[in-house]
Image: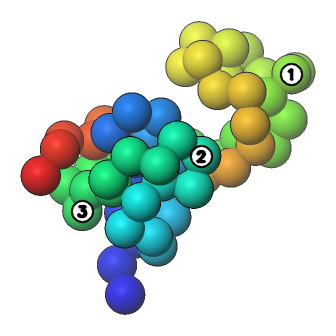
């Protein structure tokens, strides 16, 4: 099963709906960043990420 990403919050999962916001996920994504500690991460702050996890850098809706 292929991983999918949410076009709204960019989190990566195997689900058809985003586990964070409930939006329909997409197979059309690229780039991957793993955020372990969003409070101490400059990248997480720049990307507006507040929850640890795996995130896509670009996601296109299908």
- The label number, if any, that marks residue 62 in the structure image: none
Badge 2: residue crowd in 10 Å (few <14, some 14–19, many ≥20):
few
- The answer to whether marks 1 and 3 mark residues whose Cβ atoms lie closer than 8 Å is no
Q: Which residue is mark 1?
A: 39
Could you tell me which quadrant the N terminus lies in?
bottom left
Residue drawn at the location 76% of the way across and 43% of the way down: 52
Q: Is residue 28 left or right of residue 57?
A: left
Image x and y of residue 43, in percent: 64, 21
Residue drawn at the location 47% of the way across and 49% of the way down: 22
- Residue in the foreground of this view, choosing between 26 and 43: 26
Image x and y of residue 9, in percent: 47, 35
Cα separation, mark 2 vs mark 1, equals 18 Å
Secondary structure at numbered mark 2? loop
Image x and y of residue 3, in percent: 40, 70
Question: Which of labels 2 and 3 is toward the front?
Answer: 2
- The answer to whether marks 2 and 3 mark residues whose Cβ atoms lie closer than 8 Å is no
Secondary structure at numbered mark 1? helix
Cα separation, mark 1 vs mark 3, equals 29 Å
Cα separation, mark 2 vs mark 3, equals 17 Å
Question: Which of labels 2 and 1 is toward the front?
Answer: 2
Residue 42 can be seen in this image: yes
- The label number, if any, that marks residue 20 in the structure image: 2
Q: Which residue is mark 3?
A: 27
Q: Is residue 44 left or right of residue 21?
A: right
Q: Earlier in the sequence, mark 2 or mark 3?
A: 2
Residue 33 in the image: above or below residue 38: below
Q: Residue furthest left?
A: 62
- Residue in the foreground of this view, choosing between 41 and 51: 51
Q: Residue furthest bottom?
A: 1
Tag count in the figure?
Answer: 3
Residue 32 can be seen in this image: no
């Amino acid at each position: 099963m292929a991983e999918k990403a949410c076009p709204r919050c960019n989190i990566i999962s195997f689900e058809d709906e985003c586990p964070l916001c409930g939006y329909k996920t997409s197979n059309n994504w690229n780039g991957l960043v793993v955020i372990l500690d969003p409070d101490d991460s400059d990248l997480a702050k720049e990307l507006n990420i507040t929850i640890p996890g795996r995130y896509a850098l670009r996601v296109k809706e299908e």
